[in-house]
Image (cartoon, grey):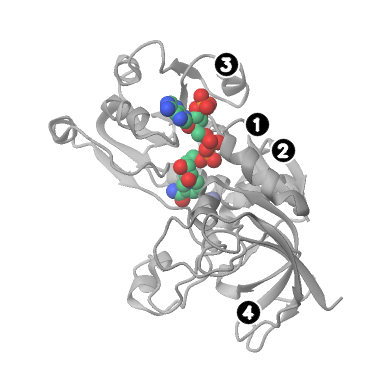
Amino acid sequence: MSKMRAMVVPQPGGRLNMEERDLPEPSRQEVRIRVQACGVCHSDSITVQGQMPGLVYPRIPGHEIIGIIDALGPDVDGWSVGARVGVGWFGGSCGFCGHCRRDAAFACENIQSVTGVTRDGGYATHMLALTSALAHVPDALDAVQSAPLLCAGITTFNALRNAGAKPGDLVAVHGIGGLGHLGIQFAARQGFRTVAVNRGRDKETLARSLGAHDYIDSASGDPAQALQDMGGAKAILATVTNADAMQGIAGGLGVNGTMMVIGAVGDLTINSLDLLGKRAAVRGWYSGTSRDSEDTLLFSQRHGINSMNEIFPLQQAQAAYDRMMSGSARFRVVLEV
Ligand SMILES: NC(=O)c1ccc[n+]([C@@H]2O[C@H](COP(=O)([O-])OP(=O)(O)OC[C@H]3O[C@@H](n4cnc5c(N)ncnc54)[C@H](OP(=O)(O)O)[C@@H]3O)[C@@H](O)[C@H]2O)c1
Ligand SMILES: [Zn+2]
């Protein structure tokens, strides 16, 4: 086959259109991937709605990709045709600039590469990826079921393991959506005393079945006070999509606690006296690199961590995107290619 199909955003705010294109040839240190599945993430709205300056259109969104390498560009070492690979938001790094050497490959000076944002992503039958963006995918993991681990999974897994909490510490997962339902599973399996926080009690039973030891209904009282009553959180994984809700729980941090800000909610108001009095911190966190993706996939396989998904065919990407944006999906939306 010398053609590919893709669901393309023609301009900011435009609808996803099916396009047939010539199969692209991989350049130096790139591979071509035959996409098997791509998750639909809330962050795809950056591309679909044009929420960042300087974006170039048309663009193919999608950054939760699992597929199979079907062609190699020049100078590709260590990867072969037929290998199962995953690609996330991290679209590659040079490995030698100042940022890469300080373990900040996301800010790489030489390759400004964000999958599905500044380069084409996985709402397609095929895509190109830099080898530095590739993660090995264990054979045992199903592509459609596991694609969300490449963003919702890595983001929560990696934030939790970098939040400074140790096994037994109180960790709150705020929000039980696409990210939160994985965050609860990771927090429990990483050994934390895991408390799920959400508005209402609709998701309490599910949260407990995913591994939460406790549950706080943020609508029936002050969630920060509820966390203080439990001794104060060593870490809060803040995945809600609303700023008021997020800042309303920051006061639940305990001494030396850290709130990991995952949800993209814009401005936050935080009480500085509360922070300094406890040496607490509010810290932003993006997903991670391809190495972090591999760690996430292996940890998920070993501990039986699964994303709960609603599945759509590629050509229904617009319906899939609308479903995700509605906030009603349980919990992740995935395109099967
Ligand atoms: N930092 C990163 O690298 C990264 C990576 C991926 C995604 N993200 C961001 O992470 C956020 C979460 O994504 P998601 O896919 O998990 O979203 P989602 O599935 O829509 O879940 C959102 C959660 O926020 C809660 N929520 C929404 N509005 C609320 C309000 N007004 N008050 C209280 N709770 C509210 C929802 O509560 P209900 O259950 O009651 O509806 C739900 O639990 C998004 O902002 C996304 O862009 C960041
Ligand atoms: Zn994402």
Against 98, residue 84 (above or below) is above
Point out the tag, 2 or 1, that comes first from the N-terminus: 2
Q: Quadrant of the C terminus?
A: bottom right
Residue at mark 2: C-beta within 8 A of ligand 1 = no
**Which numbered mark, 2 or 4, is in the foreground of this view?**
2
Q: Quadrant of residue 19?
A: bottom right
Q: CA distance from mark 1 to mark 4?
A: 35 Å
Most extreme residue toward the right, as rendered? 1
Residue 229, horizontal then vertical, whole percent = 31, 14
Q: Nearer the viewer, residue 80 or 127?
A: 127
Point out the tag, 1 or 3, that comes first from the N-terminus: 3
Q: CA distance from mark 2 to mark 3?
A: 19 Å
> In the displayed structure, does residue 126 sit left or right of residue 255?
right
Residue at mark 3: C-beta within 8 A of ligand 1 = yes
| Amino acid beneath label 3 | Asp
Point out the tag, 2 or 3, that comes first from the N-terminus: 3
| Amino acid beneath label 2 | Glu
Q: What is the crowding at mark 4: few (fewer than 14 residues within 10 Å), some, or many (at least 20)? A: many
Q: Are marks 2 and 1 in contact (CB under 8 Å)?
A: yes
> In the displayed structure, does residue 72 sit left or right of residue 272?
right
Q: Nearer the viewer, residue 264 or 193?
A: 264
Q: CA distance from mark 2 to mark 4?
A: 31 Å
Q: Nearer the viewer, residue 190 or 331?
A: 331
Q: Which residue is mark 2?
A: 310
| Amino acid beneath label 4 | Glu
Name the disc covering residue 202, or none. Answer: 3
Q: Which residue is mark 1?
A: 330
